[in-house]
Image (cartoon, helix red, strand yellow):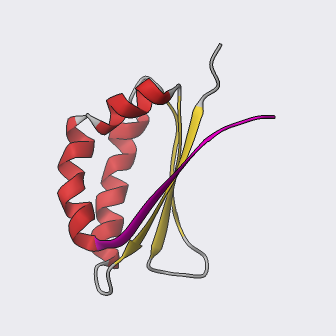
Amino acid sequence: MTTPLTLVATLVAKDGFETELEQTLRGLQGPSRAEEACIQYDFHRDAEQSRTFHMIEQWRDEAALNAHEATAHFQAALPAIEHAAEKFSITKMYRLS
């Protein structure tokens, strides 16, 4: 048995692009949650920094994440994300306990 992969993506919108980035990220939620290997796909706005968004995702394994990143809906969103975000970071984790 493998441990699911948890991913936290943090994106900071360019000044004035908060709505555009939020709409793009919201658009990913439904199709991503529908993927067979998706365990969790939650979207958050930072409580202290209003231009910062966090995606908390959990995938069956690394291969599932790679398959997600190759989907048409993810690939279609990338140009809009790159246009609206000034920072983008990803943290990948495996639960230990």
Q: Quadrant of the N terminus?
A: top right
The quarter of the displayed image where residue 18 is located: bottom left
Query: Which residue occupies 42% across, 27% down?
Result: 64
Q: Quadrant of the C terminus?
A: top right
Tell how many labels: 0
Verify whether residue 79 appears in magenta.
no
Query: Which residue occupies 35% across, 58% down?
Result: 25
The quarter of the displayed image where residue 82 is located: bottom left
> Left or right: where does residue 39 sit relative to residue 80?
right
What is the x, y in percent for residue 37? 46, 25
The range drawn in magenta is 85-97
> Left or right: where does residue 60 sit relative to residue 22?
right
- Residue reaching furthest to the right: 97
- Residue reaching furthest to the top: 1
What is the x, y in percent for residue 30? 37, 43
Query: Which residue occupies 45% across, 60% down?
Result: 89
Q: Nearer the viewer, residue 37 or 91?
A: 91
What is the magenta segment's predominant secondary structure?
strand
Query: Which residue occupies 18% across, 58% down?
Result: 79
> Left or right: where does residue 81 sit relative to residue 48?
left
What is the x, y in percent for residue 23? 31, 64
The quarter of the displayed image where residue 14 is located: bottom left
| 92 is higher (above) or lower (below) than 15 | above
Verify whether residue 92 appears in magenta.
yes
| 32 is higher (above) or lower (below) than 85 | above
Q: Nearer the viewer, residue 69 or 38?
A: 69
What is the x, y in percent for residue 68? 35, 34
